[in-house]
Image (cartoon, coloured by chain):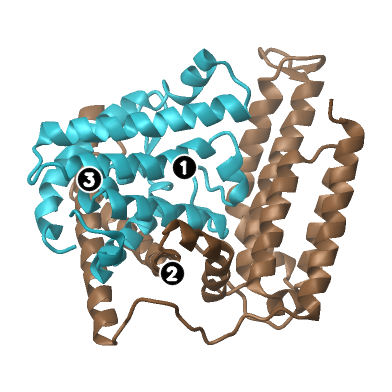
Amino acid sequence: MITLGQYINNNSFGHRLDARVKILATVILSLLIFQARGWEIFLISSFVFIVCFICRLNFFSIWKALQPLVWFAVLLFALHLFFTDGTVLFTAPYLPVEITAEGLSRGLIIAWQFIALALCGVLLTMVTSPSDLVHGLTYLLGPLKYLRVPVQDIAVMVSMSLRFVPTLLEEYDRIKQAQIARGSAIETGRPARKIKSLAALIIPLMVSAFRRADDLTEAMEARGYARGPRTTLNQQHFGREEVFALLVLGVLLSLVLTSQFLRAPFP
Amino acid sequence: MNKTPEKTSLRGMAYASMFSALMAIGAYIMIPLPPVPITMQTLFVMLSGALLGGYLGALSQIGYILLGIIGLPVFAGGRAGIGVLIGPTGGYLIGFVAGAFILGKLTSLRRDPGVFWLMGAITAGMIVVYTLGIIQLMIVAKLSFLKAVSVGLLPPLPGDAAKIIAASLICRKIRRHIFNRI
């Protein structure tokens, strides 16, 4: 699961683009995806496909990243398909199930939203290295430091937890197998026993996680980690390519907003 | 644990970021309990506040939300992106921050909180989480109060009651491992 959208090193327009612009684009796209109806769906989909093409990502790796989510999308689709009231299109023989026009369209839209959102996230993480992402995010959250939010500390924390996630996931799998081998009732058994075996799962996981955090702290202190503004290997840059990307994004945004405004003018 | 923001130690930061990672994993740890399968996320919200204190607990939840915003599929159901935060269930995520802060503050009122004090503090924190969650659910999904409660509060309630008990017990066991270290 955690291999989802791992960074693929390459040199394309999408890879070179500044992380701040890419984060901003993802945020705007995910807002648009939530509002999209009708032909805007095709507009946004084709935009995302063009971006995939520009970033020189092969479709196999994208498919591999999205595969685990496709089943969830199908489930969401089925949920809306079968449980929405409206005009009946089709009644399944022998089953108390009716397929309605509203259910079909809503299910399609929800499934599309889900996949499109996931695709945007996957794209961002595939073309941006985690350290660039964190750096860009720190910049974008920068104004919060006037509210006494420790933005620098949060940035360091996010990059630390990025590092912790795969390790802890592996650790969790190992502990779970070990407990099941010892006869843990985590998947069978009555609720009261499940809670007990849950504790037998969580406590070792947390103790091991605290130990890892201790190791990391000592390693960082030994290397002379100091608080405060940090520098990075790759400087952030804002050049012609970034302006171009923002312009394209602006065009897309205004197209979708115009279409929405035409459909439902403000009262 | 009454420390000013400037004085959070590096170790505290490492613990908090570890809790962000645990939150991310918690979305995938599912226990099949009736009526709905429960995830371990709220358990880690409770533990982050109860073990790290209010300030670091809230920071760990902010870190978790940021992990989701930069595109890691760490929100419930494998979702990601800023859209989730402003979507119908986003109030719970904001509630995680506020809830962890409040239950952490309540926990650190006592030097060595007992199981019942912990349960009370955690329950108060969870009330904050669900209040914020239901308010946003009502606003974004345009549901009436009763409908929002029946969708957003009743299904996870039995699981959460069990988790409050489990969290208090786990906290009592683990607390001495990290006490005096942060």
Q: Is residue B87 above or below residue A250?
A: above
Give SS at disc 2. helix
Q: Residue at x 62, y 80 (%)?
A: A236
Where is residue A263 shown, x and y percent of the image? 90, 32
Give SS at disc 1. helix
**CA–CA distance in space, label 2 to label 1:** 22 Å
Which picture quadrant has residue A175? Answer: bottom left
At label 2, counting other C-alpha atoms closer than 10 Å, the crowd grade (few under 14, some 14-19, many 20 or more) is some
**Given the image, on which type of amino acid does mark 3 rest?**
Ala
**CA–CA distance in space, label 3 to label 2:** 24 Å
On the same chain, marks 2 and 1? The answer is no
**Given the image, on which type of amino acid does mark 1 rest?**
Leu
Where is residue A138 shown, x and y percent of the image? 52, 68
Mark 1, residue position: B93
Q: Is residue B119 left or right of residue A106?
A: left
Which picture quadrant has residue A33? Answer: top right
**Given the image, on which type of amino acid does mark 2 rest?**
Gln
- The chain that appears brown in the image is A
Mark 3, residue position: B50
Q: Which mark is residue A152?
A: 2
Q: Residue at x 54, y 62 (%)?
A: A143
The reply to whether residue A6 is in sight is: no
